[in-house]
Image (tube, grey):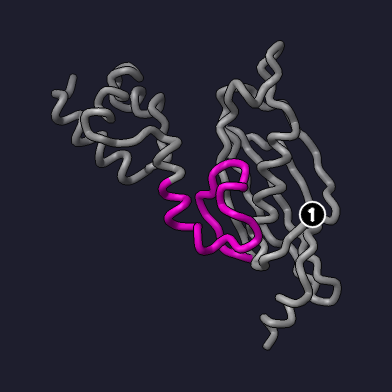
């Protein structure tokens, strides 16, 4: 049964409110209309495109939380963070991120997403990568969305190092895994102990 434009637009608003990270393509599938129809609906309803929605939610929620680097320097968009515990970011692979010949993402973009997330999760104004042990599990292609999850494994107060494990997925398939040894300033660790 086809919905009226008004019904579809109302459901569209509710769907985006529940999940601001849903893509136009997923919305088109859900409502069985073209992507262009979804875009026109969003335009009429003054709902920004996905990238702007993500940016707004992330900046609003995490601007004051991330201490180790400015939020705009994180590669990908942070969608969840708990300092010194865990963080999640998403990265949409676009034409500028891939090799022209085969449309495969350049590895440094996937690495940069993971590395910047490992930095962002550190509850310190100074966080630098001291060492990284990484594995690319499969190629990432243009148009795919990479979801990176960082988890703090160990905080060593003695040497001012934190071990962060980052796993990156495309549609629940592991594409990257890394263990980052992050340097953090000893001063902030001593301040936290007081």
Span highlighted in magenta in the image: 56-83
Question: Is any part of residue 1 visible from this angle?
Answer: no
Q: Is residue 155 left or right of residue 84?
A: right
Quadrant showing the N terminus: top left
Residue at image position (41%, 35%) is 50
Question: Is any part of residue 26 visible from this angle?
Answer: yes
158 w.r.t. 150: above or below: below
Residue 124 percent across, percent down from the top left: 67, 67
Residue 82 in magenta stretch: yes
Residue 130 percent across, percent down from the top left: 84, 56
Observer-nearest residue: 96 or 111?
Answer: 96
Circle 1 SS class:
strand
Residue at image position (45%, 36%) is 51
Q: Is residue 6 left or right of residue 37?
A: left
Residue at image position (22%, 33%) is 45
Q: Name the residue carrying label 1.
A: 129
Residue 147 percent across, percent down from the top left: 59, 41
Res. 49 image quadrant: top left
Residue 119 percent across, percent down from the top left: 69, 55
């Amino acid at each position: 049964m086809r919905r009226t434009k008004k019904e579809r637009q109302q459901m569209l608003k509710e769907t985006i409110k529940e999940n601001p990270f849903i893509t136009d393509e997923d919305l088109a599938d859900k409502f069985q209309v073209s992507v262009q129809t979804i875009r026109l609906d969003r335009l009429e309803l003054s709902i920004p495109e996905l990238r702007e929605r993500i940016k707004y939610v992330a900046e609003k929620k995490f601007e004051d939380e991330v201490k180790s680097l400015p939020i705009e320097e994180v590669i990908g968009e942070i969608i969840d963070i708990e300092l010194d515990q865990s963080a999640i970011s998403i990265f949409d692979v676009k034409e500028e991120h891939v090799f022209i010949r085969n449309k495969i993402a350049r590895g440094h973009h996937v690495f940069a997403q993971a590395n910047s997330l490992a930095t962002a999760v550190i509850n310190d104004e100074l966080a630098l990568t001291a060492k990284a042990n990484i594995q690319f599990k499969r190629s990432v292609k243009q148009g795919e969305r990479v979801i990176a999850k960082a988890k703090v494994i160990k905080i060593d107060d003695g040497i001012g190092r934190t071990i962060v494990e980052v796993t990156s997925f495309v549609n629940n398939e592991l594409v990257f895994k890394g263990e980052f040894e992050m340097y953090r300033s000893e001063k902030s660790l001593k301040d936290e102990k007081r």
